[in-house]
Image: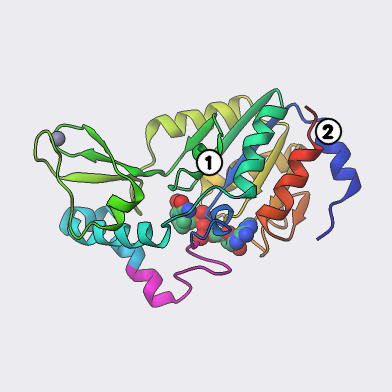
Amino acid sequence: MEFPAELRDRLAAVRRLGVITGAGISAESGIPTYRGIGGVYADPARGDEIIDSLSGETLESDPDRTWRALAELAAHASGAEPNAGHLAIADMERRVPEFVLLTQNVDDLHLAAGSRNVIRVHGSIHDARCLGCAAITSMTREVLAALEAAPRCASCGGLLRPGAVLFGEMLPTDAVRRMEAEFSLHPPDAVLVVGTSALFSYIVGPVVDAAHEGRLTIEINPEETALSPVVEYHLKGRAGHYLPLIADALRR
Ligand code: NAD
Ligand code: ZN
């Protein structure tokens, strides 16, 4: 797990850094990923079942089932705290003049670690929204994990929907607008992608664009992904190992 010396020099010159994360960065906090090493749904039948439960369609036909699946995910995440990788990313934001973080995670561990300019493209598991009056209800992981049916709004009694984007649903428009502004209109001079199986076009796109334009691209993942042949550096290992080394190489 070596760290290339010339990458160290390249990082020292970065002024605007874009970081993209997926479930892999939270694996070392004890939150299982969906796919890849240690993925909780490595079993294909179980995977199909959970994806079906966490779909926009199931939320409409059987909201209790969607909420029970979310409760199960929250139970898997009980006691999880930010790890060395989350903390290193928060440190990077303090070291470079301009910084943006795009995360697919719904666990809010980046915020807990102190990251500020964060685009949560898949929302947050901790915010629920009333389908009747649109009020937001914050839920702790413990409250979520204990749910046995769809919760109701305290002010109007309406059905609550999860604050996370479900499979088959559109992305939040404000997140899409921010992704465009931060990664296309004003592109980072280095893009670092960590712990994602990189299945979504809006995750792949900013990395491919940067690579094609000759900007610095780095992937951290113990496995090969569709992005591995595209990036300039694939650091094949754990986020918690490589991210502190990268933060350290950035100028202060
Ligand atoms: P994914 O589960 O599809 O892929 C995880 C990736 O992380 C794999 O490529 C794996 O090789 C890599 N990985 C595993 N351990 C790692 C480590 N220690 N360091 C670096 N990489 C590691 O995750 P995804 O691409 O984010 O897509 C899954 C979807 O499910 C996302 O939409 C996300 O919102 C959601 N999800 C979120 C969480 C969370 O919030 N923590 C957890 C599971 C799934
Ligand atoms: Zn309401």
In the image, residue 8 above or below residue 197: above
In the image, residue 1 above or below residue 206: below
On the image, the x and y values in percent for residue 36 come to 56, 67
Q: Please provide the residue range marked out in magenta.
A: 32-49
In the rendered image, the residue lying farthest to the left is 157
> Residue tagged by mark 2?
12
* Kind of residue at disc 2: Ala
On the image, the x and y values in percent for residue 171 come to 39, 41
- Residue 189 falls in image quadrant: top right
Q: In the image, what residue occupies the spot 12% across and 33% down?
A: 155
Mark 2 nearby-residue class (10 Å; few <14, some 14–19, many ≥20): some
Helix, strand or loop for the magenta stretch, by majority: loop
Tell me the quadrant of the picture where the N terminus can be found: bottom right
> Residue tagged by mark 1?
110
Q: Nearer the viewer, residue 17 or 127?
A: 127
Asked whether the viewer can see residue 241, the reply is: yes
Q: Nearer the viewer, residue 62 or 240?
A: 240
The answer to if 40 sits in the magenta stretch is yes
* Kind of residue at disc 1: His
Q: Is mark 2 within 8 Å of ligand 1?
A: no
Q: Nearer the viewer, residue 200 or 122?
A: 122
Indicate which quadrant contains ligand 2. top left
